[in-house]
Image (cartoon, grey):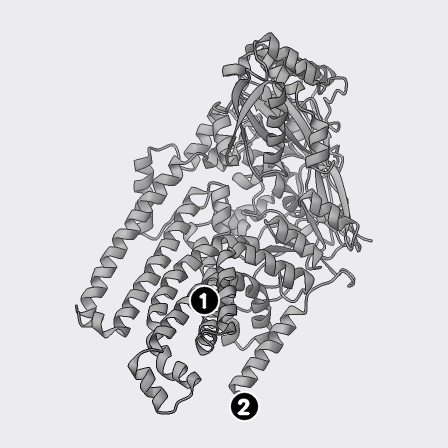
Amino acid sequence: MPFLRILVLRLLTTGITLAGVAVIVFFVIRVVPGNPIAMMLPPGATEADIARLSALYGLDKPLVAQFGIWVAGVVQGDFGTSITTRQPVLALVLGRLPATLELSIMALVIACLLGGAAALTGTRFRGGRTEGAIDVANGMALSVPDFLWGLILILLFGVLVPIFHISGRVTPSLDLPFTTSFYLFESLIRLRFDLWADIVAHMFMPALALAIPLAAITGQLLKQSLKETMNLDYVTLARTKGYGESRVILREALRNAALPTLTLVGVQFTFLIGGTVIIERLFSYEGLGNMAIDAVINRDLPLIQGIVLLFAVIFTAVNLIVDLLYTVLNPRLRHG
Amino acid sequence: MNLNRRSLLMLSAATVAAGSFGLPSFAQAIDELVIAYNVNLPSWDPTVGPSAVNPTIQGIYQSVFDQYILQQPDLSPAPGLLTEWGWSDDKKQVWMTVREGVTWHDGSPFTAEDVAWSLARVAKPETGSPIQFVWGTLANHRVEGNKVIADVAQFDPTIFKWMYFLTGYVLPKAYYEKVGAEGFEAAPIGTGPYMVEKFERNAFVRLKANANYWGGKPDFDTVTIKFVPDSAARVAEVESGNSHVTLEMPYEEYDRLKGGPLAGIATPISDIGMIFLNDIDVMLDPNVRKAAAHAIDKQAIIDRLLSGYGVKIDTLQTPEYEAYDPSITVPYDEAKAVELLAASGFSADNPVKFKIQTTKGFKPKDYEMVQAIVGLWRKVGIEAEIEVYEIAKHYELRAADQLAPAAFYNWGNSVGDPTTSTGFAMFGPSPHSVWDGQDLIDMIGPLWGEADEAKRIAGWKAVDKYIADNALVIPLLQYVQPILHAPGVVVTPHASGALLPHLMKRA
């Protein structure tokens, strides 16, 4: 199937998925108990006050009419106004997106490094105690959820040996000369290593907490894949040429073995972004996840809708990229 | 510089280490006070939207804005931006004298116009104040010299108490009109003890002391309030020295840390724990209600579940409230509970059954307390099924009068007036009440507009006695707020629960 046709087809299905998400999120959050007006009712409010506030926030209209208004706004780039912050939803979520993306990417890099190192070491010393130890460590990493890793890291590197910051994204007293919200990348571009170090010191623990389970999964899969590849004829041929075991793994086996892992990493990355909700809360990290929890607690309907829709866009975009990348890397798929 | 892979790695490690080791510690003198706060601040307008009625945020608002009337740490009112206030003899007007010599954070003078405008603004329905029904009882606000006069559209004896309660803040007329709502959110100014220097939503707010504050310059020049909603992270913040003060942590953690490198203070605040009884099903039987009330050993629950941090209460008033009457009691009496249930044909073998709703984790040990209560009830012949729900669902069910026969809740009343505790919680027509008995409506009704203060308070005490005698609600305890802080700072707690940086001093 030609690449362009695959792309068009995937974009179409992505559009349908997003429309479905929009419908579901809009109606589900209005069906579940708890509405924003009840949340802000002070002692002494009357039925008339409830009606007045409902009208003020447009919640007095029929659901279908509310949906129509919202969709019409979204099409024009207006996602509504947050009830709690009284700010435009789009500006709020786009303002927080870079923080979550940076955290997720850092977690992904750490996961790939840890998982890759574990897989390569396990393959190099396969069948021995080292591989056994790596398997045990992998099992532990997988069986402990990310938020618990977060708590363990806070205790270890936040309290007992306080070398990393426990909360936030940057030290409040620092003056940030940034023009974007991509603090980590912009500090590097501006060669402000002092700020970069401060940001990393804030991000490292939440990123590591997110990365540990993903590192275990990627490490396991890559090791399995490497071990299978190591039995293939071309690898045996490389050995007969006199190459050392490490060189065979790195130069010959790794490239082929990495393909299935790449797909998995893509899929897992979307789960990793989902995991930021709890981790950002735990580390008081100013990303989308932290904002999402506040929005749910306060029943800030427009903000919940905006965040869920943005998460859906990210998930579908990542899946799309992975699919396309896989198509490019795998000639069998590219040529039908 | 020749930058190869090794030197880049070394440089990275060195810079991260430099960034990391800049952490504060207990040993250092406190130049900049850092507070790990338990909630985020969604909006800077303290008069509209859901944030305006969120009691936990009021401490931040009160750092930047002044209320019309100052509330002291013991909840009593004191001269603030208003130095004097009162009604005309015929109660047709209110008058307020405005403090002179006060300036806004931008240096412009604070005037009586600001007070009149602030009151008129929140009285308009289109402004969106959740408390409009209170502010709307005043009309035709006008300025006469340094006095503000307003007509009383509907007499409310608590109107001046609202001036140091939710949404009772003075905003700058000229500045607000110049920058608009959006501009005010971006750069808020007030007359309060601190000025906003930097605000990162969901992260922190950095405050600078207002050198011209009419109440005297605060002790700490710079205060950073970090928003740390997770209690484990808040404890870690103070334990590691990253923050100097925090609040609302598990009592076990408080006990563990207060005697070590940290100091602690735990005082009762104006929040109470209670069980709403809805007048449906078995709760229509007074014997069941009274048995349910007598079967609860409140002190044992406080001692065993809350490490002793709580004050047993038998009415919806705490000892600090004006209508508190220590003579009204509902003692723990298991035998009496058994006897009352037997009179209605129930026993341990033939228990009365109903549902009790509760939050889990919204307040300290809320679910565990309800579990303990259900255990105590089981002993006397009450079989209660626990349903856990979110606080948002509680609000919605309560407003629709659809709570289960019993529902655990916490009630805040930082002005200490009986109308904002017993009144709104138990007056049938109020959306906050689920008890709709006409007898109680008839008792409470005349008290809303009672102009004679002594008679009004006596009336509320009689209402509380009637409620206790008939077990129309089950008050449980007054909460105690734990605050942990570095030894270098002295914290003055506020009975409203607001953590106020300007009340903190260097040790």
Q: Which mark is residue A108?
A: 1
Mark 2 burial class by Cα count in 10 Å: few <14, some 14-19, many 20+: few
Q: Which mark is residue A157?
A: none
| Residue B28: quarter of image | bottom right
Q: Which mark is residue B2?
A: 2
Front residue (pair B340, A47): B340
| Residue B157: quarter of image | top right
Residue sitting at x 56%, y 37%? B360
B139, above or below A95, in the image: above
Residue sitting at x 66%, y 27%? B476
Residue B172 image offset from top left, x and y in percent? 60, 45
Answer left or right for A248 relative to A182: left
Front residue (pair A80, A121): A121
Do the numbered discs 2 and 1 sit on residues whose CB atoms are within 8 Å? no
The amino acid type of the residue labelled 1 equals Leu
A63, above or below B211, in the image: above
